[in-house]
Amino acid sequence: MTNLEDLMISKVRVKILKLFFADTHEIYYVREITRLINEEINAVRRELDRMLGFGLVKSEQRGNRLYYCLNPRYLFFQELRQIIAKTIGLGKDILQFRRKLGTLNFVMFSSKFTSGQLPHQGEVDVLVVGDVVLSELEQLIKKHQQTIGREINYAVFNQEEFMFRKTRRDPFIMEVLYSGRVMIVGNEAEFVERKIPGLN
């Protein structure tokens, strides 16, 4: 049974979660995790045992090593992914430098992007809606492209164009709306709403 106490986490567990959520399909063994997060092996083992106990991670024996990975069926998996997307990497920087970026109505990361997966052709990693200072956004995007070692596909719309495209059921916008996502800025319900504000 999952309860709130399970989520009251230590510094070591935070580091493990950041590592695991950087690529939700990756698997790691204990000494590898210890090296990557620079923590004591006993502390890492203790946290992995706790996370196994309430179902956040799964383990799998391969040869003489026990590997660990995230359990996507964990009750609070999506909520944790959203929290972590806002507190590391590009999400953290967007929130930290939000004023420099202009007036942001919505910032959305695709589920693939927050899971460390590559987008298919025509898919976006990041969608930004608002009166955006493009030079500032481009600077942040370039920084994180270097960090993750690949191009980040992103699109920017002002609020009027975004709403217009939604009401016209623009194929690109519909694809975004029907795909999995994590909201970094803005309300999920307002993001998908196709009604133009002020009109009945």
Image (spheres, rainbow, N blue to C red):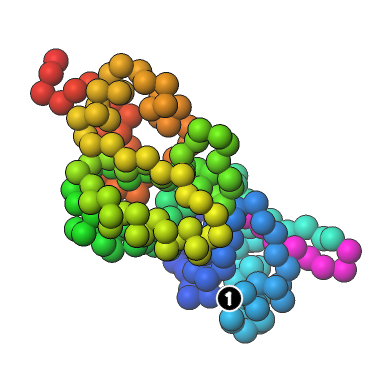
Task: Using the rendered image of the protein, determine whether residue 6 is visible from the camera's viewpoint.
Answer: no
Check disc 1 and report its element: helix, strand or loop.
Answer: helix
**Position in image of residue 21 (x %, y %):** 54, 57
Residue 32 location, x and y as percent?
A: 70, 73
Residue 139 is left or right of residue 85, and the answer is left
Q: Quadrant of residue 35?
A: bottom right
Looking at the image, residue 16 lies above or below residue 75: below
Task: Work out which residue is located at the far left of the displayed protein and give it.
Answer: 198
Residue occupied by mark 1: 37
Q: Residue furthest front?
A: 135
Which of 121/82 is in front?
121
Q: Label 1 crowding class (10 Å Cα cut-off): few <14, some 14-19, many 20+?
A: some
Camera sees residue 29: yes
187 to 196, vertically: above or below:
below
Determine which quarter of the picture holds residue 107.
top left
What is the x, y in percent for residue 86? 38, 57
**Left or right: 66, with 17 as reference point:** right
The answer to whether residue 82 is magenta is no
Magenta residues, start to end = 63-70
Q: Is residue 72 left or right of residue 131?
A: right
User: Exactly how many numbered labels are in the figure?
Assistant: 1
Compare residues 73 and 140 and report the one nearer the observer: 140
Majority SS type along the magenta span: strand
Residue at the (87%, 68%) spot, across then down:
64
Seen at 65% across and 77% down, the residue is 34
Q: Residue at x 47, y 49 (%)?
A: 152
The amino acid on which the numbered mark 1 sits, given as a three-letter code, is Ile
Q: Looking at the rendering, which quadrant does residue 55 occupy?
A: bottom right
